[in-house]
Image: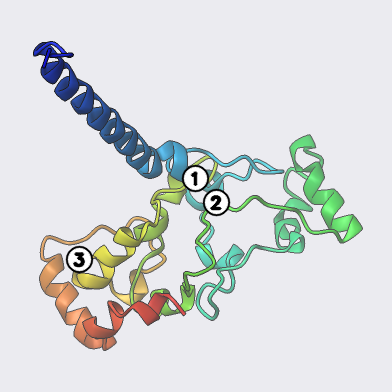
Amino acid sequence: MTQIFHRSANTLTILALAGVVAALAGVCLALYMTTWSNYKTGVGIDVQQPVPFSHRHHVRGAGLDCRYCHGGVETSAFAGIPPTHTCMTCHSQLFANSPVLKPVRDSFQNKIALQWNRVQRLPDFVYFAHDIHVGKGVGCSTCHGHVETMPLMREQNAFHMRDCLDCHREPERYLRPRDQVFNMSWEPPADQLAKGRELVREYGLQRAILTNCSTCHR
């Protein structure tokens, strides 16, 4: 029988199949990298707000404690967004006529809450409670970064599942004394692992519970 295809067709077929596999692998890699990229997660990108609230000015400049605005952080799952009258405690006197603060004044006078844009957002199937983490020695800056340096708030961590598990599997690397939770200048000491293990015992943390699926997914 006469040969229909030239012998080189075998090589071309192999190259074509290899090209298809390489293209599919490239697409999968691109999707994977996009999913974990800052473009997708928003890490490091300033979030625009109705009023350009500066944590750097209020925390580092004015010396406000996190709990002054986020009053629920020690007692509830949600840290809380300050009501407008909290802002007006100072701004009825300071920068009272500033055009930038007009939305705040209007909100206070009309009793309509400002619609702040969320910075951190977790999926609905994830349960997270601020009060539990604060009570167990997890500092604000551990999750939110050094907000005292941020003119506009932005995400420091993407909070993928692996980020949470890093801490839940080895909490001794991240825990601090309770009286340092709101200290934005706190840095882990040289013997953090040793002190962290002591805190794990003091706080009564159990790794089996920390890494159990139902702890975060309820």
Residue to which mark 1 is pinned: 154
In the depicted structure, whether residue 203 falls above or below residue 148: below
- Does residue 177 sit above or below 163 in this rendering? below
Nearest to N terminus: mark 1 or mark 2? 2
Amino acid type, callout 3:
Arg
Disc 1 residue type?
Arg
- Is disc 3 in contact with disc 1, using a CB cutoff of under 8 Å? no
Q: CA distance from mark 1 to mark 2?
A: 6 Å
Characterize the local packing of mark 2: few (<14), some (14-19) or many (20 or more) Cα atoms within 10 angstroms.
Answer: some
Q: Nearer the viewer, residue 168 or 14?
A: 14
The residue where tag 3 is placed is 173
SS under mark 3: helix
- The image quarter in which residue 163 lies: bottom left
Whether 199 is drawn above or below 152: the answer is below
Which residue is at the far right?
A: 110
**Residue 199, image x and y in percent?**
22, 80
Residue depicted at 47% across the width and 78% down the height? 131
Q: Name the colour scheme.
A: rainbow
Callout 1: few (<14), some (14-19), or many (20+) C-alpha neighbours within 10 Å?
Answer: many
In primary-sequence order, the first of circles 3 and 1 is: 1
Q: Earlier in the sequence, mark 2 or mark 3?
A: 2
Where is residue 14? Give x, y as percent. Answer: 15, 24
Q: Secondary structure at mark 1?
A: loop
Q: Nearer the viewer, residue 186 or 120?
A: 120
**Marks 1 and 2 in Cβ contact (< 8 Å):** yes
- Name the amino acid, label 2: Val
- Label 2: which residue? 119
Residue found 38% across the figure and 62% down from its top: 183
How far is the residue under mark 2 from the one under mark 3? 25 Å
Measured as percent of width and height from the top left, residue 161 is found at 35, 61
